[in-house]
């Protein structure tokens, strides 16, 4: 892994001066880069190398060395915009998958030689994951050991349950159509930080003509069948939602819930949970009172 550590974005290494100059002209990124103790990474999307990291990002880079960095690079390459304005996306910075995803700014640009680079700027302070201590070698024993029993998840377990048919999840769009929240399976997290218009245009959301029309017209919709795919396989879902803000309140997006109706072929289907009854129109949540 090739990493150059610098104290500020203004001291970019040769080849990155042009991208940083472009990013500094964008209000959201210039404020994030100029913040005291700002953490940022510049990654080469093809190889996943860290070309540059702010001084405050060094513990994070060290903690992500190896498979953790490769996983982060795949997340970034999948979620980063192809061009134009920067995009918000939730990234898993903890290779143990214990800490929740972190909302980050992602912006793509070209180096002085024309090769693409991606800037990553977390919007909140990041605590690097602790390295796991090496497991001690077991002491030899002549006694035969009993067969281990299947582990049982404790009530406080942080491991996410495998998705099942009829599972319910929540979602939220901001006023610009950006998907800011999706509490569903981890396999759908790659959709967060993208606009529903772009998802529809790229085929990552299909079969939802009624819902897309309702989003354009800012009206409530219920039980719209759709297929969502964040690159991990298609999930068949039913979506319901309503505009956020009513009366004289300013429109601030959409919020609603969804039901999983079918899993990708790679995920084994378990016994379905009890069917969730359709909610009446008056029960569509998330509108401001």
Image (cartoon, helix red, strand yellow):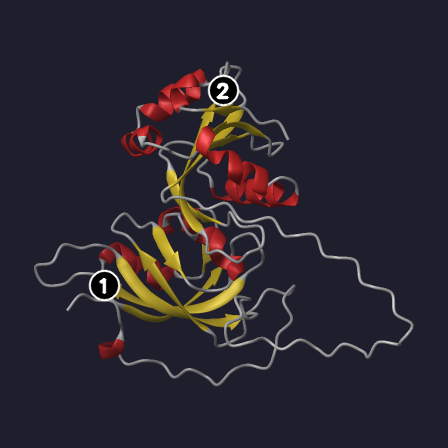
Tell me the number on the disc at residue 178: none
The answer to which of marks 2 and 1 sits earlier in the sequence is 2
The percent position of residue 275, horizontal first and vertical second, equals: 46, 84
The local crowd at label 2, few if under 14, some if 14 to 19, many if 20 or more residues have their Cα within 10 Å, is some
Q: Residue at x 38, y 19 (%)?
A: 10
Helix, strand or loop under label 2: loop
Tell me the number on the disc at residue 219: 1
Against 155, residue 21 (above or below) is: above
Q: Quadrant of residue 9?
A: top left
Tell me the number on the disc at residue 111: 2
Q: Is residue 101 left or right of residue 32?
A: right
Q: Residue at x 33, y 59 (%)?
A: 172
Q: Residue furthest right?
A: 142
Q: Residue furthest left?
A: 248
Residue 204 seen in this snapshot: no
Q: Residue at x 66, y 75 (%)?
A: 151
Q: Is residue 184 left or right of residue 244?
A: right
Against 192, residue 110 (above or below) is: above
Between the residue at mark 2 and the residue at mark 1, the CA separation in whole angstroms equals: 44 Å
> Which quarter of the figure is the C terminus placed in?
bottom left
Residues 226 and 32: in front is 32
């Amino acid at each position: 892994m090739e990493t150059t550590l610098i104290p500020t974005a203004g001291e970019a290494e040769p080849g990155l001066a042009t991208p940083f100059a472009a990013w500094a002209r964008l209000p959201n990124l210039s404020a994030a880069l100029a913040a005291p103790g700002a953490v940022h990474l510049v990654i080469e999307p093809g190889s996943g190398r860290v070309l540059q990291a702010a001084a405050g990002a060094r513990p994070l880079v060290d903690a992500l060395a190896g498979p953790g960095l490769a996983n982060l690079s795949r997340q970034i390459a999948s979620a980063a915009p192809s061009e134009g304005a920067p995009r918000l996306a939730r990234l898993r910075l903890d290779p143990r998958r214990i800490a929740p995803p972190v909302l980050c700014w992602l912006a793509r640009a070209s180096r002085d030689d024309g090769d693409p680079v991606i800037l990553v700027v977390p919007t909140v302070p990041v605590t690097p994951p602790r390295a796991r201590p090496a497991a001690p070698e077991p002491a030899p024993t002549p006694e035969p050991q009993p067969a281990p029993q299947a582990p049982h998840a404790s009530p406080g377990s942080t491991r996410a349950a495998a998705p099942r048919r009829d599972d319910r999840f929540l979602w939220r769009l901001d006023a610009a159509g950006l998907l800011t929240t999706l509490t569903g399976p981890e396999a759908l997290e790659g959709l967060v930080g993208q606009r529903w218009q772009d998802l529809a245009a790229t085929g990552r959301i299909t079969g939802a003509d009624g819902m897309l029309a309702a989003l354009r017209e800012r009206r409530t919709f219920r039980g719209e069948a759709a297929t969502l795919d964040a690159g991990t396989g298609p999930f068949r879902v039913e979506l319901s939602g309503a505009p956020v803000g009513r009366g004289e309140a300013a429109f601030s997006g959409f919020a609603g819930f969804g039901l999983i109706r079918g899993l990708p072929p790679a995920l084994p289907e378990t016994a379905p949970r009890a069917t969730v009854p359709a909610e009446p129109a008056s029960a569509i949540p998330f509108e401001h009172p």
